[in-house]
Image (spheres, grey):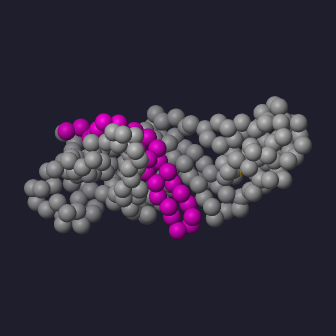
Amino acid sequence: MMDIETCLKKLGYVGVLDFATVDEDGAPQVRNISAIHYEGTTLYFLTARGKPFARQLKADGRIQILGYTKYKETIRLSGRTVEVPEEEQIKWRDVIYAEQPYLENVYPGETKNIDTMFMLKDYTIEYFCLSTRPITREYFAVGNAEIRKKGYCISEDCIGCGTCQGVCPQGCIEEGSPFVIHENHCLQCGNCFENCPVEAIRRY
Ligand code: SF4
Ligand code: SF4
């Protein structure tokens, strides 16, 4: 069983994470960020005020942060960022600069005043591991975030024919009335959905 603390620790070990936003045209934008500080379950990170990244965060706030470990684990954080209050900006900026001295080469001396700090307090975590058999998928909610279900479930329309079991690459469908998908081991590939003869499988 995974947990929130371990997920964040793993992301800390990965170090450089992908941060995805959407721009003013709704187009995806992704970049690597290493200037991150973990304070409990809150993530603080910095960028420069003039960058499109900062503008997108101010305008929209939604973000997805993703790290991939050498154990074939994907850890994805989804939530809404807020700018750190003015009176705390310097404090958290200095924490990150102390943890990551290379930043002084990027913004030496007073030039670092162009930096601005954002924080992520409320978010969901999706943990997805491909090195287990069957695969492992778990969700966690941090702060006020709510988990939005993804994947597939089997409805009462199931006639018990067993076709879905035969096509499931992870063997994560259990016989029953109706049959049941074990979501923590589901790839969300949709093979069961496409092959059910009575359309009893629903997408969340
Ligand atoms: S294929 Fe459809 S009807 Fe057959 S067992 Fe699976 S869910 Fe039920
Ligand atoms: S979506 Fe794919 S992995 Fe999940 S239960 Fe259906 S066939 Fe199996």
Q: Is residue 151 above or below residue 6?
A: above
Residue 82 lies within the magenta run: yes
Q: Is residue 160 left or right of residue 146?
A: right
Q: Residue at x 59, y 54 (%)?
A: 128
Residue furthest out toward the top: 156
Report the number of discs.
0
Residue 91 visible? The answer is no
128 with respect to 37 (left or right): right
**Spot occupied by residue 70 in the image (x, y as percentages of width and height):** 52, 68
Magenta residues span 58-86
- Of residues 85 and 82, the one nearer the viewer is 82
x and y, in percent, of residue 20 in the image: 40, 49
Residue at 39% x, 62% y is: 15
Image coordinates for residue 14, horizontal then vertical, percent: 44, 63
| Apparent side of residue 194 relative to residue 34 in the rendered image (left or right) | right
Taking the magenta stretch, the answer to whether it contains residue 36 is no
Residue at the location (21% across, 54% down)? 94
User: Residue 87's x, y, as percent?
Assistant: 19, 39
Question: As rendered, which of 196 and 6 lies closer to the eye?
Answer: 196
Q: Is residue 72 visible?
A: yes
Residue 79 found in image quarter: top left
Residue at (50, 42) in percent of width and height: 124
Quadrant showing the C terminus: top right
Residue positioned most to the front: 25
